[in-house]
C-alpha cells in the first residue's frame, strides 16, 4: 500500500456531561481509576490508540461489543440498550472515572441517554468532524463516509444543518465496511481475501462520492465518520488521492478527554505506569489479533466479558 498523509484537526467537541455530584477536588484513588472506552467492535481501538498516546499515565478499560456488531446497521433501540448496559457495567465493575463512547453510531443514538442516566460520570462522544472539515476545505466541497446509523440519525441532521450553506457535503452511507474491517481481525494481517473485501468496499463508496481533487467543484476533504474506517485509511487515501485531506477524530477526542479530566482534577499522577485492559463480548482471538496489529499489545491484555 502506498504511503499517505493524514491531516488531524480539532473536532467540534460534544457538550460535556453534567458535573452534578462531582467535587472540584478528587481523591488519589479516583484519579487512579481507569477511563472506560467503548465501541461496537474493534474500531474504537483507533480512539484508544490516540488516548494512550495523549495520556500514557492513565489506565484504560476498553470494551468491544463485537457480539452485537455492527451497530451502524442496527436500530436505535438496540444501540441505546447496549450502550447503557455497557456504561453501567464498566462503571460498576471497573469503577471508571470517565467514559469515552468511541463509536459514532452509539454517540448519535445514545449519548444523551447516557448523560441523563449517569449524570455524575464525565462522558465524551465522537461525531463526524464536519465543522473542521468545512473550515479546511478550499473548494468548499466535503465528503463524509459513515455508517447508515450515523447519517440517518437526528443528531447528524442537526450537526449538518449547523454548518450553514457555505460548504456542500456529499454524504455516503458505507454499508458493510465497518463489518468487513471487524471481520478482518479474525484473519491473518496479510489475508488477501479479507483485504480485497475491504478494498472493494472502500472503492465503491469513495467513487460514489463523486469527483475528488483540488480543483473548483471537487471534493478536497474527506471525513471518516466511523472509528473503524481509520484502519482502512491507507486504501482510502490511495483512492482519494494525495491532494485530498482525510480527517479522523481520535486525536481530537483524546485532547477533549484530557481537558475534561484536567478540569475535574482527575488526571493520573505522572509517575503512574498506565495499564490497558481489553474486553470483548465476541471472539477473544479476534480482539487479540486487533490489539497486536493496531496497538502492539499481546493477548495477555485481552479478556472475554459477558455483558447482558
Image (cartoon, rainbow, N blue to C red):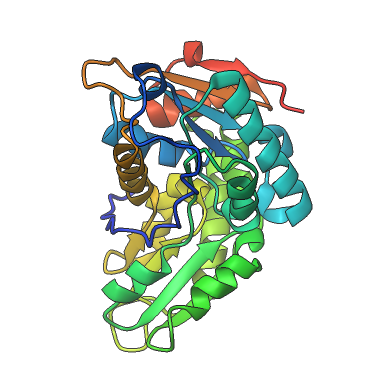
In the rendered view, tell whether residue 20 sits above or below residue 37. below
Q: Quadrant of the C terminus?
A: top right
Left or right: 278, with 151 as reference point: left
Farthest residue, direction left: 271
- Residue 248 shown left or right of residue 225 in the figure: left
Looking at the picture, how far across and down is residue 191, in whole percent?
53, 34
Q: Is residue 106 visible?
A: no
Residue at image point 60% right, 54% down:
112
Name the quadrant containing residue 211: bottom left
Please state which of residues 130 and 66 is positioned toward the viewer in this rendering. Answer: 130
Residue 303's spot in the image, x, y percent? 59, 16
Residue 248 x/y as whole percent? 39, 55
Considering depth in this image, is 229 or 251 the residue closer to the camera?
251
| x and y percentages locating residue 241 in the rendered image | 33, 66
Along the viewing direction, whichever of 106 and 295 lies nearer the viewer: 106
Q: Residue at x 66, y 42 (%)?
A: 83
Against 209, is 100 above or below? above
User: Which residue does the image show at 38% across and 62% down from the upper left?
Assistant: 12
Number of numbered discs visible in the structure rendering: 0
Q: Is residue 214 visible?
A: yes
Viewer-proximal residue among 273 and 149:
273
Q: Residue at x 59, y 66 (%)?
A: 155
Amino acid at each position: 500500500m502506498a504511503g499517505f498523509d493524514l491531516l488531524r484537526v480539532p473536532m467540534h467537541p460534544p457538550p460535556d456531561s453534567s458535573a452534578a455530584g462531582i467535587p472540584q477536588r478528587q481523591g488519589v484513588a479516583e484519579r487512579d481509576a481507569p477511563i472506560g472506552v467503548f465501541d461496537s467492535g474493534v474500531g474504537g481501538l483507533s480512539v484508544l490508540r490516540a488516548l494512550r498516546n495523549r495520556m500514557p499515565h492513565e489506565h484504560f478499560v476498553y470494551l468491544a461489543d463485537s457480539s452485537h456488531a455492527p451497530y451502524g446497521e442496527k436500530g436505535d433501540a438496540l444501540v441505546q440498550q447496549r450502550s447503557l448496559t455497557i456504561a453501567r457495567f464498566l462503571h460498576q465493575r471497573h469503577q471508571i472515572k470517565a467514559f469515552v463512547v468511541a463509536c459514532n453510531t452509539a454517540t448519535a443514538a445514545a449519548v444523551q441517554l447516557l448523560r441523563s442516566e449517569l449524570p455524575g460520570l464525565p462522558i465524551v462522544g465522537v461525531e463526524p468532524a464536519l465543522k473542521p472539515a468545512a473550515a479546511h476545505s478550499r473548494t468548499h466541497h466535503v465528503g463524509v463516509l459513515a455508517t447508515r446509523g450515523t447519517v440517518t440519525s437526528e443528531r447528524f441532521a442537526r450537526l449538518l444543518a449547523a454548518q450553514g450553506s457555505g460548504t456542500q457535503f456529499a454524504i455516503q452511507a458505507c454499508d458493510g465496511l465497518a463489518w468487513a474491517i471487524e471481520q478482518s481481525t479474525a484473519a491473518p494481517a496479510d489475508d488477501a481475501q479479507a483485504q480485497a473485501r475491504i478494498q472493494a468496499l472502500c472503492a465503491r463508496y469513495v467513487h460514489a462520492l463523486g469527483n475528488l481533487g483540488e480543483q473548483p467543484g471537487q471534493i478536497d476533504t474527506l471525513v471518516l465518520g466511523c472509528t473503524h474506517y481509520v484502519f482502512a485509511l491507507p486504501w482510502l487515501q490511495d483512492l482519494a488521492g494525495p491532494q485530498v485531506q482525510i480527517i479522523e477524530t481520535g486525536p481530537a477526542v483524546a485532547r477533549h478527554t484530557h481537558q475534561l479530566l484536567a478540569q475535574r482534577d482527575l488526571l493520573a499522577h505522572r509517575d503512574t505506569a498506565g495499564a490497558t485492559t481489553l474486553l470483548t463480548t465476541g471472539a477473544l482471538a479476534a480482539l487479540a489479533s486487533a490489539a497486536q496489529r493496531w496497538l502492539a499489545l499481546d493477548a495477555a491484555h485481552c479478556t472475554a466479558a459477558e455483558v447482558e
